[in-house]
Image (spheres, rainbow, N blue to C red):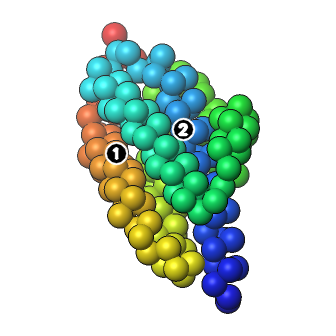
Amino acid sequence: MSGNTALEVYLTGLRNQHLVETQAIGTLQNEMAYTKDYPELHGRMQMDKDRSTEQAARLEQLLERHGTSKSYFKEAVGGAVATVAGFAHAVSNDDVLKNVLAAIGYKAYEIASYKALIALAEAAGASEDRTVLEHSMKEEQEMGDWLGEHLPGLVRSYLEKQAA
Ligand SMILES: [Fe+2]
């Protein structure tokens, strides 16, 4: 594969991940309305939303570094309702457990995406992008771990609330 092809695949990957982050912001915003009874989860989602905003900004910086124009992002943000293939996470509903399970799957997808982007950056000769991508990947891992660790407790409080 030529260096140019690797760069094209990498840049497409960065754009896709920018859409993923933009969509995550909207999804979190919607779902947070249903998690006010779960203060710890609610706080964590707020943090994830703030981090997603930063992650999207990081991706914009990387794309700009590789010559993508700013006007692209205005369109991307305007089109944030675009669906991410294969993920039902954007379908917001009031079932907290379903949303948490979907979020765990979504985080696994995001971790894998950043891992792929790191490999693509290397192949495209953009190894200077690695630190930024790793930063975002670690944040995704933290959130994924938190959700996984707290899932049993969330199930218990869900059941308590159903019984109340
Ligand atoms: Fe993210």
Provide residue 133's location: percent of width, then percent of height.
42, 60
Indicate the amino acid at tag 2: Ala
Does the beta carbon of the residue at mark 1 sit less than 8 Å from ligand 1? yes
Residue pictured at 48% horizontal, 78% vertical: 122
Quadrant the N terminus occupies: bottom right
The residue carrying mark 1 is 143
Provide residue 70's location: percent of width, then percent of height.
65, 44
Residue pictured at 69% horizontal, 71% vertical: 8
Provide residue 143's location: percent of width, then percent of height.
34, 45
Q: Label 1 neighbourhood size at 10 Å, few (<14), some (14-19), many (20+)?
A: some
The residue carrying mark 2 is 24
Indicate the amino acid at tag 1: Met
Q: Is residue 98 left or right of residue 83?
A: left
| Image vertical order of residue 153 relative to residue 21, above or below | above
Res 67 → quadrant = bottom right
Q: Label 2 neighbourhood size at 10 Å, few (<14), some (14-19), many (20+)?
A: many
Could you tell which of marks 1 and 2 lies nearer the N-terminus?
2
